[in-house]
Amino acid sequence: MGKEPRVLWIVMDSVGIGAMPDADSFGDTGAATLQHTASSVNGLNMPNMAKLGLGNIASIQGIDPCESPTGFFGKMAERSAGKDTTTGHWEMAGLFLTKPFSFYPDGFPPEIIEPFVEATGRGVLGNKAASGTVIIEELGQEHMDTGKWIVYTSADSVFQIAAHEEVITLDELYKACRIARKQLDAHRVGRIIARPFVGKPGSFSRTYNRHDFSMPPEGPTILTVLQQNEVEVVGVGKIKDIFAGVGVDRSIATHGNQDGLEQTEKLLDEVERGLIYVNLVDFDMTYGHRRNPQGYAKALEQFDAFLPSLQGKLHDNDLMILTADHGCDPTFSAHTDHTREYVPIIAWSPGLKKGGELGVRKTFADQAATIASYFHVTWEGEGTSFLSEMGLLGIEG
C-alpha cells in the first residue's frame, strides 16, 4: 500500500477568500466569502483547516493563524476573465479561457429562444436573469398549468431550464438541454443547466437531479494529459459535466456535500493510482446563491469535521489539494451571483512533517502543473508547479 501516487483534489465550490484587484469591474468590490461568512456567525469552528494553515492565508474570525501548520497554504488569482464554474475549473486544470463566454443579462434574443421552442415543442416562461429559487416561485404555478419551460440566466454564461419533475420527466428535460447545447455552441454559452424541482407553490424546492451540459474544453487539460499517460481520472460530483466528459474515466454522481465526502472516502479504498477530482456544490448552490451565511458556515464546519476521515485514508506518498473555483459571498447584497475573488490553496501530504507558505499564485493553473509533476508526466501547458516549495520530488512543470 502507498507505492502508487494518488492525488485527492477537492474543490470547495465558491469558497473564495477575498476580492481580487479587478473585482470592481465585475461588480464585486469588497466581496470576501470566507471572511464575511465567519463574521456573520461570530467566528467559524474549523480546527482541522486551521491546522493546515487556512488562518495563515487571511484574517478569518474564529480561525487563528497556526504557528506550525501541517499544510502548504496560499491563495490563487484567476487569470481568465470570469468568475464562473467552468472558467475556474478549466483554469485550474491548465486551460485559460482566451475568448470569453457570452452573457445575456437582459434575457436571450429571439434567434436563441425561437429555435429552442420549435425543437422542444414547448413554450418558454421567464427568459431573464434571475435567482433560481425566486423565479421558480414566481412562475412555478404557470409552468405547471401550461407545461412551458422556465428559462433564465444569471451573471454567468448559462442557459438554465427549470421544470417540475411531475410535469415534465427528467428524460425530456435532459433531452431539451442537449438540444439547447447543440444550438448554443455557436453562441458560446458556457453551460446549459437542467434545474428540476418538486413541491407546490410556496414550497417548491430544487432537487439534486440537476445536470450541467458544458461546452467541451477548447484545448488539453491536466485530465486529458493524465489519461494519455494511463493515470485514472475519477470525477466526483459535477466534474464530468464541467468538462463535458473529456478527460474523465469514471464519474460518481452525488447528492450534496455530505454524500460527496462519503463517496470520496469510499474511492480512497478503491483507487490505487490516479486523480480523484471532487466538486462539493452545496457551498455555492444551496447557501452562496441563496445568500444564507448561517447555512454556509454550517457547511464549512461540517466539511472541516469530515476532513480527518479523508486524511486518514491517504498514504504517505499521496497528495491532497484543497481549493475553490470562484467566490459566492453569502453576505453580498449587490446581487446573488458569483463573486470575483482569490481562492485558497492548501496542499498536504501525510509524508511531510511540516508545512509552509505558497504565497499568492498568479493563476489557478499552478495546480495542473503541480499534479503533472507529481505523476511524473510531461506538462506543456500553463502554470508553475509548487512541488519544490513543498520539498517533494517531481518533474517541475
Image (tube, rainbow, N blue to C red):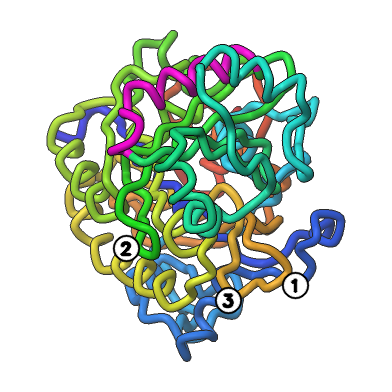
Residue with the mark numbered 3: 35
Residue 112 among those drawn in magenta: no
List x then y, in percent, for residue 67. Answer: 46, 79
Residue 261 versus residue 42 in the image, above or below: above
Q: Given contact means CB atoms under 8 Å apart, are the residues at marks 3 and 1 in contact?
A: no
**What residue sits 73% from the left and 46% below the top?**
362
Task: Locate residue 310 relative to residue 168 in the image: left or right.
Answer: left
From the viewer's side, name the closer residue of 319 and 208. Answer: 208
From the viewer's side, name the closer residue of 19 and 71. Answer: 19
Q: Amino acid at mark 2?
A: Phe
Chain part drawn in magenta: 165-183
Please identify the quadrant where the N terminus is shown. top left
**What residue sits 54% from the left and 85% below the top?**
39
* Separation (CA) of disc 2 from disc 3: 17 Å
List x then y, in percent, for residue 152. Answer: 61, 42
Which circle's residue, 2 or 1, is located before the other in the chain? 1
Residue with the mark numbered 2: 303
List x then y, in percent, for residue 195. Answer: 44, 40
Q: Given contact means CB atoms under 8 Å apart, are the residues at marks 2 and 3 in contact?
A: no
Residue that lies at the very extreme toward the bottom in this rendered image: 42
Dot 1: element: loop
Residue 375 versus residue 27 in the image, above or below: above
Residue with the mark numbered 1: 30
The crowding category of the residue bearing disc 2, from other C-alpha atoms within 10 Å (few below 14, some 14 to 19, many at least 20), is: some
Which circle's residue, 3 or 1, is located before the other in the chain? 1
Residue 237 versus residue 55 in the image, above or below: above
**What residue sits 42% from the left and 81% below the top?**
44
The crowding category of the residue bearing disc 3, from other C-alpha atoms within 10 Å (few below 14, some 14 to 19, many at least 20), is: many
